[in-house]
């Protein structure tokens, strides 16, 4: 059976620098795959090719077993691939519903001819998706800037799930969060897995990786140097692969 999302020998060069070198990996529905590696390992470049920011120089991206061309981030979103970067891409001066519907606002006719924002509809739908994901935000009318880091992360995730993401890519989802909020975000990731979402996480936090990941992909200097089932490895082995103390292989 093919993966829901898969890369085959995907490569990206910037001048003479090979940022990602023939990397193959996949993620299935209801699975969490962690991408780990030191700074400069190629993790961000890899997910930017999947999310349409960069075009691969070589290799293929497959969705449901079929080769796809992802020409832009909007193209990726249309194919059900959503990416949540560290900055979350939220409008801090706007409220929760406005962010969930950002760029995809719902309108209605006023006076029979004028399109105006349908704020009631967006608030109702936002409340529904937050309830479905068991996310507690005291007031949907609160500006994003007034929410905690964990609540902001939850809004960004809710936006992706509301718009029917099949694949969710999360870049350092627990960075700069307190311990209690880290736990809530990891619980949310586990909940999304149970709903059949395919999740790719980039993280430097080994604890987070082992809490939620089914498989771990290790990259170093643009190359995939190891793949492990989380339940059959240890943080010590993963760190050894990251720093180059472990023999390079692709066993799982």
Image (cartoon, rainbow, N blue to C red):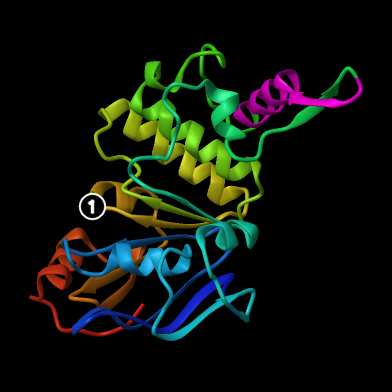
Residue 20: give x, y in percent of width and height: 29, 77
Q: Residue at x 44, y 34 (%)?
A: 90
Does residue 151 lie above or below 204 as drawn?
A: above
Q: Quadrant of the N terminus?
A: bottom right
- Which residue is label 1 attached to? 206
Dividing the picture into quadrants, the one containing residue 74 is bottom right
Q: Residue at x 73, y 32 (%)?
A: 106
The reply to whether residue 1 is in sight is no
Give the main secondary structure, helix, strand or loop, of the magenta stretch: helix
Dividing the picture into quadrants, the one containing residue 187 is top left
Q: Quadrant of the C terminus?
A: bottom left
Q: Residue at x 51, y 18 (%)?
A: 137
Residue 158: give x, y in percent of width and height: 56, 36
Does residue 200 lie above or below 59 as drawn?
A: above
How packed mark 1 is, by other alpha carbons closer than 10 Å (few <14, some 14-19, many 20 or more), is: some
> Which contiguous range is marked in magenta?
112-131
Residue 134: give x, y in percent of width and height: 57, 28
């Amino acid at each position: 059976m093919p993966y829901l999302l898969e890369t085959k020998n995907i490569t990206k060069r910037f001048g003479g620098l090979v940022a990602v070198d023939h990397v193959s990996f996949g993620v299935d529905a209801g699975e969490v795959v962690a991408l780990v590696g030191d700074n400069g390992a190629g993790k961000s470049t890899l997910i930017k090719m999947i999310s349409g920011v960069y075009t691969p120089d070589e290799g293929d991206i497959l969705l449901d077993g079929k080769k796809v061309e992802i020409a832009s981030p909007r193209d990726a979103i249309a194919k059900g691939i959503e990416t949540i970067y560290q900055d979350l891409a939220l409008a801090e001066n706007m409220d929760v519903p406005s962010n969930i519907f950002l760029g995809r606002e719902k309108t209605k006719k006023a006076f029979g001819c004028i399109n105006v924002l349908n704020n009631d509809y967006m608030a109702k739908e936002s409340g529904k998706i937050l309830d479905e994901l068991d996310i507690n935000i005291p007031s949907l009318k609160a500006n994003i800037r007034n929410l905690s880091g964990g609540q902001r992360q939850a809004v960004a995730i809710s936006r992706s799930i509301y718009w029917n993401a099949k694949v969710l890519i999360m870049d350092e989802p627990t960075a700069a969060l307190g311990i209690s909020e880290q736990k809530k975000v990891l619980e949310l990731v586990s909940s999304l897995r149970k709903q059949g979402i395919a999740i790719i996480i980039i993280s430097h936090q080994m604890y987070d990786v082992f809490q939620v990941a089914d498989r771990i992909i290790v990259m170093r200097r643009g190359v995939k140097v190891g793949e492990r089932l989380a339940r059959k490895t240890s943080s010590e082995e993963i760190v050894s692969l990251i720093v180059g103390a472990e023999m390079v292989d692709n066993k799982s």
